[in-house]
Image (tube, rainbow, N blue to C red):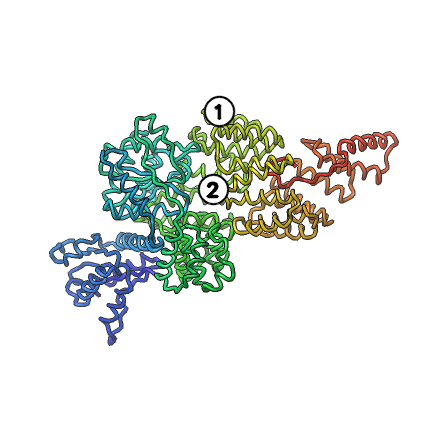
Amino acid sequence: MIKAFFSYSTQDAAFVREVASEVGRAFATIDYRSFHAGGDILGSIDEALKESAAFVFFLSKAALASPWVRHEIREARFQTAMGRIKNVLVVRLDSHIGPEDLPEWLNRTKHITTIAAKPAARRIRALIDDLVRQGQSPRFVGRSAEIAALQDVYSAPEPGAESQVACVTGLPRIGRRSTLTKMVRESLDLETLLVIGVEPGDTVQALAAKLSALVDPSETPEESLQRTREITALSDAQALAHALIKFQEVCLYHQMPVLHDEGGLLDNDGDIAPYVLDLIGSLSQYPDIVTALLTNRRPSPDHFIARGMRPLGVVHLRPLEDADISRLVGLMAKARQIALAPATVKEVTAAVRGYPPSVTFALELITAYGPDLAIRGKMLSDFGASPLTSYLKQNKFSNLEQRILRVIAANSPLPLSVLQEATNTSEDGIDKALVHLIDASLIVPTVGGWYEVSGPAVDAIRREFGACSKAEYGAVATRLDKFLAQSEDGTDYLALQRTLFRAIDKAGQQSTPRAYALLTDRVRLAEQYYHEQEYQRAVDMATDALSSDPGIHQARTTLIRAHVKLGDYAEAGDHIAELKKRGQMRDAFFLTGFLERHRGEHREALNHYQKALSSGRGGMAIHREMADCYLRLGDLTRADEHISRAEEKQPDNRYVVDMKIQIACKLGDRDTALSLLVRLADIDRAEMVSHRTSRVEYLCGNMETAYEFAQKAVEKSDNIRFEVLANYVLCALRTSRVGEASTALDQLDRKFSKQRRDIRTGLRARLSIAQQDYQTAYAYTERFISPERLVHLLIRRDALRGMLDRTALAPQRRADLKAELKRCEDRLAGREEDFDLDARGDVS
């Protein structure tokens, strides 16, 4: 645990205690005068300093006159020289004390002059938070070639913009930040990185506002809002100049400003956002700025060349070699005082597959269960495929810790007090839980002084512990709004104001003057609503974003997909036409294929997907979509070919694994399907694994088992999906649970009133047949959008048979129905087909 030693005079004790109360960091032990008279006071002081990572000296005349304080200063210097104390801060309580009154080594440390507790506490919190962030980074090994390549970029013989910025690429969790941090500390005389996320919908004004929130902390939230509004009202040229000035200031603070691609830095073609290109092009006018970009893939050089600029120097990081990972395992195990046999080191190395952060999670499991059980119990098998999910499943997190993770994964960042109140936790409870989650590298302090979930953990937390509920969003919104109404002397209020806006919207509450949204927050919410199957809300939010800026590509693509899911094909087509006008042909072709697939026109969809491929659209999604189409058309060879190509690109994508299970079922390969279900359990949410298990058993004819898993899927769902509830209805009907089917079908119609109408109509008809109400069933068959599908013909046939066998009919009516039954049976020609609940579209 990080400890901070407070050195002060007893005359300043009241002020120091107030500062300690304001600091309130659960992971920081504040050692103010707690040494007991009559004991070995000097020995206690020395031991406390030896265990501390930070030294805070409260400078006053009384402190300088204290023999105890003088001893603490001498011992702190020794512990600093030994490398145990990492950060030192002097809190000057008397501005009349000059440098000559202090030891020389203290004059070279960080200073703050204040007689107010809050500013002092804020600086101390920043000191401690920085130590926590450093402590969460794994030991550094390897990467000598990549560091040399970065040094080459920044030491280009011809000074200019091309020698002031590099692009570091690689997959998430590969070590881009740690590699860049090591290089800047060793080669550029900078202390750390200041990372600014570039999100979809961001503009140069948004970038300038984010930078200002980090560089120019406000005294109050109202000041933060006023400043943000002023910056977002600037012209592009003014905002760019403002951003560059803030970049300069960051560098003056011995930090490197870094732009991290969170979906807004590169478009689908790999082109850098134009305003970022403008910023890079202006760097030659600011020779004291050095910066970098962090992206998952290499940026296209085309727009640089078109502007007469040199393309960026790109350094690509790959997974570490086994030898480097083994060294990393050994170093981190030693730091944790874990003794590992060579064979265990080899097992861990094989499990983490070249990803440094996975070592942390693997060692946590070994700490919890011991090396023998972790290996024999196969906890580390396939660990590298989904280390975070495996870690969350196998580590024993308390109910409180799970609740904290669920809330903060959906609402980041948050102040500690808000997190405590929103989770209804005692001070001692939140302290203990937060210490564990920080030590487990799941929660990190932000540079602004708040807390957030470590980025890659967000999806894994939601899969394992469920989504944040509407009530939890409401609790966050209420407490955070109160915090902002009362807070003073904070930092990066903009981040909290954005969190408040999102929490209010998700909770369905009325907004307040303290909530604020950048355009990207609306884009982000639209995407979230789409994935949560709240398609109308996705449409509303995406439309709102586009009304502010019609050029936001991600908002338009989300809007198109949401319209398609709602069956609003004409509206989707209009927006696809807009993409074509803007020259975004590959996405227009892809989304036209998406639209046609949802119409059930799989061959037409394939034509458009092929055009998208020919236009340069790549990635996992298009091959997954094409595999789905071939599967529905019965071409299992081509379906397997495309899902294999998708798997090469993203082997642990849950939709890819799910599609492989469906193909195995169509091939009658139950053993493969069941083995893939084990793999799916590591990467998908529990309810979706139960749902897919139900579908496997259903297709294998095991109806009672299929029903049991369908019921589990419903029970585990916090926001139930259409296919889960529809499958439960179908399984209840197949096992003669008519009452359950009726209740669930009512829920399906209420929740998904605009989606997949033919499936809901068909299930209504099947329910009526099960109730022996054949005339109502027959009436439902008149409502099908696509009446000629085999499954709809089968339902109509069964309704006709029931009417003819069990209903009194006039002779002519009977003759007409018999003739219709014959036509229906002729069209079926003995073929049988069930509801296709696995189709990712609106077809039945």
Q: Nearer the viewer, residue 224 or 83?
A: 83
The Cα atoms of the two marked residues, 1 and 2, are separated by 32 Å
Q: Which x, y percent locates residue 90?
A: 21, 56
Q: Secondary structure at mark 2?
A: helix
Q: Is residue 528 left or right of residue 431?
A: right
- Residue appearing at x 32%, y 26% in the figure: 307
| Residue 451 percent location from the top left of the image | 38, 51
In this rendering, is residue 574 above or below 167? above
Of the pair 554 and 791, the residue shown nearer to us: 791
Q: Is residue 270 above or below residue 427?
A: above
Q: Judging from the image, what secondary structure is the residue with disc 1 in?
A: helix
Q: Which residue is mark 2?
A: 505
Residue under numbered circle 1: 580
The spot of residue 793 in percent (x, y) is 74, 34
Determine if residue 418 is in view.
no
Q: Amino acid at mark 1?
A: Lys
Q: Residue furthest left?
A: 100
Is residue 58 found left or right of 749 in the rendered image? Answer: left
Q: Residues within 10 Å of mark 1 (few under 14, many from 20)?
A: some
Could you say which quadrant of the image residue 154 lies in?
Answer: top left
Q: Residue at x 64, y 41 (%)?
A: 837
- Residue 723 or residue 451, whichever sits in front: 723
List x then y, in percent, for residue 752: 61, 40
Residue at the outermost right position: 811
Residue at the farthest bottom position: 38
Is any part of residue 162 visible from this angle? Answer: yes
Residue type at mark 2 is: Asp
Within 10 angstroms of label 2, few (less than 14), some, or many (20 or more) residues?
A: some
